[in-house]
């Protein structure tokens, strides 16, 4: 029986864990929606929802036309 695909919340949690582990540093650009979709074997819309959740939580910030970046910590 194949494994269930990850939800957008699961993907957001995994990306958050990767940030906390230092894999993605503050100011680093996140992979594109299509790269995340390939990485997690989900649709592009699921990857986009995961990134939107990260932005809603203040973990990431979007730069129109440039990508999504890990938010710098408040000083």
Image (tube, helix red, strand yellow):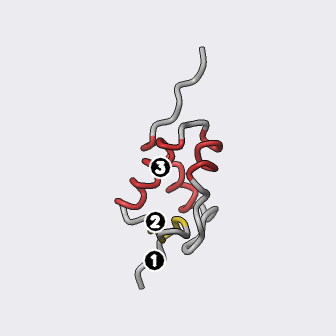
Is residue 46 or residue 14 the one in the foreground?
46
Q: Residue at the location (54% across, 38% down)? A: 43
Q: Report crowding for label 3: few under 14, some 14 to 19, many 20 or more residues within 10 A (C-alpha).
A: some
**Mark carried by residue 48:** 3
Q: Please tell me whether mark 3 or mark 1 is closer to you in this view.
A: 3
**Residue found at x 59% / y 67%:** 29
Residue sticking out furthest to the front: 65
Q: If you read the primary sequence from the N terminus, does the residue marked by circle 1 or circle 2 appear first? A: 2
Q: Earlier in the sequence, mark 2 or mark 3?
A: 3
Residue 72 lies, in percent from the top left, at 48, 77
Tell me how far mark 3 sits from mark 1, CA to CA. Answer: 23 Å
**Residue sitting nearer the eye, 10 or 64:** 64
Marks 2, 3: nearer the viewer: 3
Q: Which residue is the site of mark 1?
A: 73
Numbered circle sitting on residue 60: 2
Residue 7 location (% of width, % of height): 46, 37
Point 50% across, 56% down: residue: 16
Q: Position of residue 17 (x, y in %)?
A: 53, 54
Disc number lying in front (1 or 2): 2
């Amino acid at each position: 029986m194949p494994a269930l695909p990850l939800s957008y919340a699961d993907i957001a949690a995994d990306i958050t864990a990767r940030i906390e582990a230092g894999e993605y540093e503050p100011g680093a650009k996140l992979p594109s929606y299509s790269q995340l979709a390939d990485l997690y074997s989900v649709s592009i819309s699921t990857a986009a929802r995961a990134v939107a959740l990260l932005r809603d939580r203040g973990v990431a910030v979007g730069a129109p036309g440039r990508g999504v970046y890990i938010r710098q910590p408040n000083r």
